């Protein structure tokens, strides 16, 4: 069996963190933080893997550049398989740590302790006693606290959207769970000149990384950058529900046709990011006929769990004339088509041209400059 040290060296080679982070990644063993029971993702499935049953596969998984699912359904054994905690993908962890621009002595608040691995990396960089990490799930927090014993990290069980005032002010707030709305508490608890770094997305697009700089007037502004998909913070999850629950045979709908093909609006990173900004609350699901990916016949479903609205967009080879059905108070296909047209007319801006300003009143999303509001 290859040793954990060898596997760790290989992972560090593969992820290749910058010289500022390399030694930290070598010093903090990921397998020390990964629980004995994990789930590995393959296609749409989750395969359980336990340390006791297959120690070699478990160790290899710990040193693969993959996210490892460590809890499903918030620990409820009767759930639907919703991923609720994980050890994040090492290359994404490295990218986010770089984005946070950390230095020895910085005081850091992490949201989403998870396994504790990222908190241990942070503590190695900024120093013992400078990291507070908030985890909402008591069982996950307990396990992380045990793994972090002796690291000097202060683990708090609570809702990280509220920050953690007793240890404020912070120089950096780093979230490892995604938001659709940045909590003002994070800005309020960060010193002027400090940074808030968080995965950010919409129900249509999860997501990208947002880097905010906190200003002396108590606001924070910054731009998006990078392809980063994360679990949502608990309070901002988009509602669950199967297609069968949402699109019912008894629903009435209107039927039209369109020459708009879903490829770019759904699959292009920048197009779908912009559409998500303009069409709040909408989720999409692509269903291939006979459940076979690559089948030329498929349907894109657009759904808004809030209003019960849905649209179906039927794609078949042949003339560009696709059938669209829409049900409910929102015309989701029309909203998507309008947002896509807006993005094209705006010159197809990349997601890095968009940014956010956070004030006590909420967040504003803009294009190119804070005055040019998008939504
Ligand atoms: C992707 S995992 C974090 C990975 C972790 N940093 C690591 O190194 O393993 C996201 C975590 O955020 C937690 N979480 C979700 N919502 C939260 C909230 N509002 N406050 C604090 N933690 C939250 C989840 O329970 C989960 O453990």
Image (cartoon, rainbow, N blue to C red):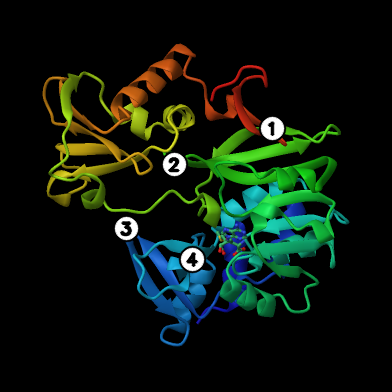
158 shown above or below 19: below
Provide the secondary structure element on which disc 3 rests.
Answer: loop
Task: Report crowding for label 4: few under 14, some 14 to 19, many 20 or more residues within 10 A (C-alpha).
Answer: many
Of 68 and 273, nearer the camera is 273
Identify the residue position indicated by label 1 in the image.
222
**In front: label 4 or label 1:** 1
Determine the CA span between mark 2 and mark 1.
Answer: 21 Å
Quarter-of-image position of residue 153: bottom right
Disc 2 is placed on an element classified as loop
Q: Which is nearer the N-term, disc 2 or disc 3?
A: 3
Measured in 3D between alpha carbons, the distance from the residue under mark 4 to the one under mark 3, in whole angstroms, is 14 Å
The residue that label 4 is drawn on is 68
**Comparing marks 2 and 1, which lies closer to the viewer?**
2
Label 4 SS: strand
Residue 347 position, x and y percent, is: 48, 14
Q: Is residue 232 above or below residue 209?
A: below
Badge 3 density bin: few <14, some 14–19, many ≥20, Cα 10 Å: few
Q: At x 24% / y 51%, what residue is drawn?
A: 245
Sequence-wise, the earlier of marks 4 and 3 is 3
Residue appearing at x 26%, y 38% in the figure: 301
**Residue at mark 2:** 203
Q: Position of residue 86 (x, y in %)?
A: 52, 64
Mark 1 crowdedness (10 Å alpha carbons): few <14, some 14-19, many ≥20: many
């Amino acid at each position: 069996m290859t040793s954990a040290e060898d596997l760790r060296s290989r992972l560090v080679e593969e992820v290749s963190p910058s010289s500022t982070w390399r030694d930290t990644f070598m010093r903090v063993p990921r397998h020390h933080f990964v629980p004995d029971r994990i789930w590995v993702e393959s296609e749409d499935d989750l395969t359980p893997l336990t340390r006791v049953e297959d120690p070699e596969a478990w160790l290899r998984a710990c040193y693969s550049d993959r996210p490892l699912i460590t809890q499903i359904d918030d620990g409820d054994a009767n759930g639907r398989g919703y991923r609720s905690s994980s050890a994040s993908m090492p290359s994404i962890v490295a990218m986010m740590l770089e984005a946070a621009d950390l230095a020895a002595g910085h005081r850091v608040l992490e949201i989403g302790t998870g396994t504790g691995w990222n908190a241990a990396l942070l503590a190695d960089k900024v120093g013992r006693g400078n990291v507070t990490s908030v985890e909402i799930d008591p069982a996950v927090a307990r396990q992380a606290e045990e793994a972090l014993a002796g690291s000097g990290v202060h683990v708090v069980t609570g809702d990280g959207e509220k920050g953690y005032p007793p240890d404020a002010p912070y120089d950096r707030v780093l979230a490892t769970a995604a938001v659709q709305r940045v909590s003002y508490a994070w800005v309020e608890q960060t010193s002027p000149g400090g940074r808030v770094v968080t995965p950010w997305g919409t129900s249509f697009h999860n997501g990208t990384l947002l880097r905010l700089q906190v200003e002396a007037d108590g606001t924070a502004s910054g731009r998006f950058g990078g392809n980063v998909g994360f679990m949502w913070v608990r309070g901002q999850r988009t509602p669950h529900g199967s297609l069968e629950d949402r699109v019912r045979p008894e629903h009435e709908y209107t039927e039209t046709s369109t020459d708009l093909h879903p490829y770019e609006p759904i699959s292009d990173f920048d197009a779908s990011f912009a559409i998500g900004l303009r069409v709040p609350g909408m989720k999409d699901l692509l269903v291939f006929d006979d459940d076979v990916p690559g089948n030329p016949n498929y349907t894109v479903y657009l759904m808004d769990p809030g209003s019960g609205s849905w649209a179906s967009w039927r794609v078949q080879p042949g003339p560009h004339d696709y059938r669209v059905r829409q049900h409910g108070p929102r015309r989701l296909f029309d909203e998507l088509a309008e947002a896509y047209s807006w993005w094209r007319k705006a010159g197809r801006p990349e997601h890095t041209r968009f940014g956010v300003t956070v004030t006590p009143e909420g967040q504003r999303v803009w294009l190119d400059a804070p005055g040019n509001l998008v939504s």
